[in-house]
Each structure stands twice: as C-alpha cells, then as structure tokens.
Image (cartoon, grey):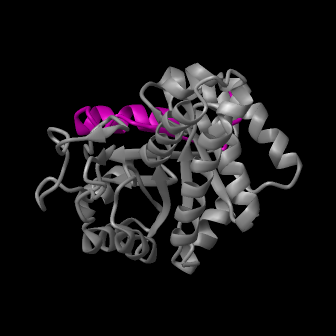
Amino acid sequence: MTYKETIADALKRGVAIGHFNISNIEGFWAVVNASRKLDLPVIIGVSEGERDWIGVKEAKALVDIVKSEGAKVFLNADHTYSFERVKEVVDAGYDSVIIDCAKLPFDENVAITKQCVEYARSVNPEILVEAEFGFIGSSSKILDAIPEGAAQDEVQLTSPEQAIEFVQKTGIDLFAPAVGNVHGMMRTGKNPHLHIERIKAISEAIKIPLVLHGGSGTPDEDFVKAAENGMAIIHISTELRFAFASALKEEFVKNPDEVAPYKIMKAPRDAMQVQAEARLKLFNKLQ
C-alpha cells in the first residue's frame, strides 16, 4: 500500500502506525528490524537536528534501500520549523513532513503552513504535510515536570473549532493536536493521561487522520483508546533514546576494554528494537 493507503487502513481498523525517531544507524536498524519481524508498517522520523546529524539525503537513501527490499517503511521529516527546511525535504523526496509553527500566533501558523502545503503539492501531491496546533513542549528527554506552557487543561487543549478552522485554511493532510500529550518522558515513566473525548471530538470534526506527538511515557490504555478514536500515527522518541542510553551504559560496565563500535553498539540496538516491537504490538492490538 502507499503511504496514504497505509494511514487510511490504520484509521479504518482503529489501530495506529508507530513513528520512531532515529539519530544513528543503530536506531535505523532497530526500527526496520522490528517492522520486518512483526510484518507491520513503520514511520522513521528525523527531526531537524537528527537530519543535520545523519544527513537529509542520506536518511532518504537508507529508507529507499530497505523499501527496495520490501520493507514497509516510510520517512517523515519530523518537527520542521521553517518553509526553507520544509522545501529541503520535499525536494529530497521524503514521504511526509511536519511544519511546526505551534509557538507562533494562529495567523502566522496558518500562513506558513499553507505555504508549505502549496509547495509540496506543486512538487509531488503524494507527499503528506502535517501541522501542529497547540503547544506540548519541545524536548525529547527525561522530565522532572510538565514543560512550561504545555496544554493540559480543557481550556488549553486544542478545540474541535480551532482544528476545523486550521485544517480548512491550510489544507493539511495530517493534524497534530494538543490533547494532554507532552514531548519527553516523565522521570516516573508515566506521563499524564490523554483526553480521549477531545481526540474523538477533533477527529469527528475534521475527518483527517490525527497524529500523536510526545507518545513516550503515555499510559498503554490511552494509546489503544486514542487509536480507536482517530489517532492514526503515534510518535515515540524518548523511550528509544532511554533504551539506547541505558543499554550503552551497561555495555561499558560489562565490557570496559571493548573498543569495537559494532560490538559495543549491539546491545543498544537490540534494546531499541525490543522497545519498538513492544510499541508496535500495542498500537496494533497484538498484545
């Protein structure tokens, strides 16, 4: 199936596609191997910083290679903050891109997002453009407190009315609302509960697929309910980073004299794969 068809299928079945951010080759293979093992589609996400580290074209080339071998893998340019950087990934042939102007006033967010949509359509109508409305924090790391300004109460959350206006004025393909989710993962391992009724209301109002950012640390039952109510894509980043860092620390303790990178990195890669598999099973109601 195409990317659009894969998302539509997930939406129809009430499941979600796992979106996993990577920043090195170990993360790439962890996600691809998890997808292959479970025979499930995945989205590999690379933020601006991750693209700067890996390489915009290099990330595309890696995904193209495994696609040519039959892997169900798609490439998303995660959190992109300017038209220029959106243009860069559209020109490179990414499957999708999110223009994130959530910190800007509504009219500015709309104007930049619309510009990105129009450019993507002019280059390749198959490229999906996503946008975010509502602030949920901006850092994928371990948190001691909810990020300042992140929407948590009923008033701050994205409303169906705001979503309708935003989608109609921009023409986006995918919408990322603030529904209690936050970027990063609480040190306790449990983030706040999602507002499922708000997710349902927004989904019914705009009738395009929703995307959940800041998935790491979200209670398992919330993921399932969110997918059943229109959340077709769920982002996981911090959980994989935590698995990587924890396994790498353990590896240095176990084998302090090892200097071969491919030996040192095997445990961190495998730890990320285990985490990705667990999330894919949950999102697809396989556990």
Residue at 55 percent of width and 64 percent of height: 278
Locate residue 175 relative to residue 51 in the image: left or right: left
Residue at 67 percent of width and 25 percent of height: 258
Q: Residue 139 at x, y = what percent?
A: 33, 35
In which quadrant of the rendered view does residue 79 lie? Answer: top left
Looking at the figure, which quarter contains the C terminus?
Answer: bottom right
Count of all numbered marks drawn on residues in the image:
0
**136 in the magenta segment:** no
**96 in the magenta segment:** yes
Residue 25 vs 281, above or below: the answer is above
Q: Residue 256 at x, y = what percent?
A: 58, 26
Locate residue 230 relative to residue 129 in the image: left or right: left
Q: Relative to the observer, which residue lies in front, 103 or 237?
A: 237
The residue stretch that appears in magenta: 92-116
Can you name the residue that lies furthest to the right here?
A: 69
Residue at 32 percent of width and 59 percent of height: 164
Looking at the figure, which quarter contains the N terminus?
Answer: bottom right
Q: Relative to the observer, which residue lies in front, 35 or 75?
A: 35
Locate residue 163 relative to residue 63 in the image: left or right: left
Q: Residue 112 at x, y = what percent?
A: 40, 31
Residue at 69 percent of width and 65 percent of height: 40
Can the viewer see residue 126 in this picture? Answer: no
Q: Residue 175 at x, y = what percent?
A: 42, 54
Residue 129 vs 207, above or below: the answer is above
Can the viewer see residue 166 in this picture? Answer: yes
